Amino acid sequence: QVQVVESGGGLVQAGGSLRISCAASGRTFSTFKMGWFRQAPGKEREFVAAVRWSSGEVLYASSVKDRFIISRDGAKNTVSLQMNRLEVEDTAIYYCAVDRRIGVIRSSAAGYDYWGQGTQVTVSS
C-alpha cells in the first residue's frame, strides 16, 4: 500500500507562482512514476505532469509545458510541482498520483494506482 499526501495549495494572483508538493510513503519502488492531475469544477480530471522516479524523465501536458516544472527529491520521497505564470484557467484541485508499474509514463488517470486527497489551487484575476 502507498500513501500519498499533497500540500502547498492556496490562492495566488494571475501571473504569480505557487509550489505544491506530494509525499509518498509505504511500499514504494524505483519503478514508480508520480504524476499530477487537476480537476476544475464541472470538468474532467486532466493530466498535468509526471516524473519517472528512477531516471527523472518527465512528461508535461502541452498547456503547462513552458510554465510548470515537476521535480523529485529522493531523500524525502517527495515530488513537487513549481507552477509559474499562473492563469485563471489553472484553478483546480490538484491531485498527486502514483503509478507503480513498469513502462511508459502515462497521462491517463486510469494508469495510476494511488491518489492523494487533493489540494486546492485558486488563481484570481
Image (tube, grey):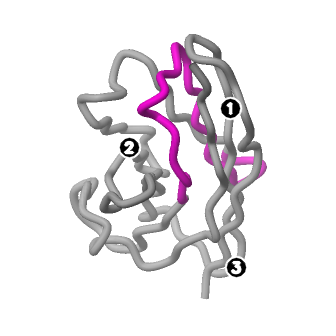
Q: Quadrant of residue 101?
A: bottom left
The C terminus lies in quadrant: top right
- In this rendered view, identify the residue nearer to me: 26 or 16: 16
Q: Are marks 2 and 3 in contact (CB under 8 Å)?
A: no
Dot 1 or dot 3, earlier in sequence? 1
Please give the residue where the numbered disc 2 appears in the rendered image: 48
Is 109 colored magenta in this rendering?
no
The residues tagged by marks 1 and 2 sit, at their Cα atoms, a distance apart of 14 Å
The residues tagged by marks 2 and 3 sit, at their Cα atoms, a distance apart of 24 Å
- In the picture provided, is 111 more to the left or to the right than 17? left
In terms of secondary structure, where does tag 1 sit? strand
Please give the residue where the numbered disc 1 appears in the rendered image: 19
In terms of secondary structure, where does tag 3 sit? strand
Q: Position of residue 31 (x, y in %)?
A: 42, 64
- In the picture provided, is 46 more to the left or to the right than 100? left
Image point (54%, 59%), residue name: 96
Look at the image and give the residue range highlighted in magenta. 74-95
Q: Position of residue 18 (x, y in %)?
A: 67, 27
Please give the residue where the numbered disc 3 appears in the rendered image: 26
Q: Position of residue 84 (x, y in %)?
A: 55, 17
Number of residue marks: 3
Disc 2 residue crowd, few under 14, some 14–19, many 20+, Cα 10 Å:
many
Please identify the residue farthest to the bottom as the structure is shown: 1
- In this rendered view, identify the residue nearer to me: 37 or 58: 37
Q: Position of residue 34 (x, y in %)?
A: 48, 56
Q: Amino acid at mark 3?
A: Gly
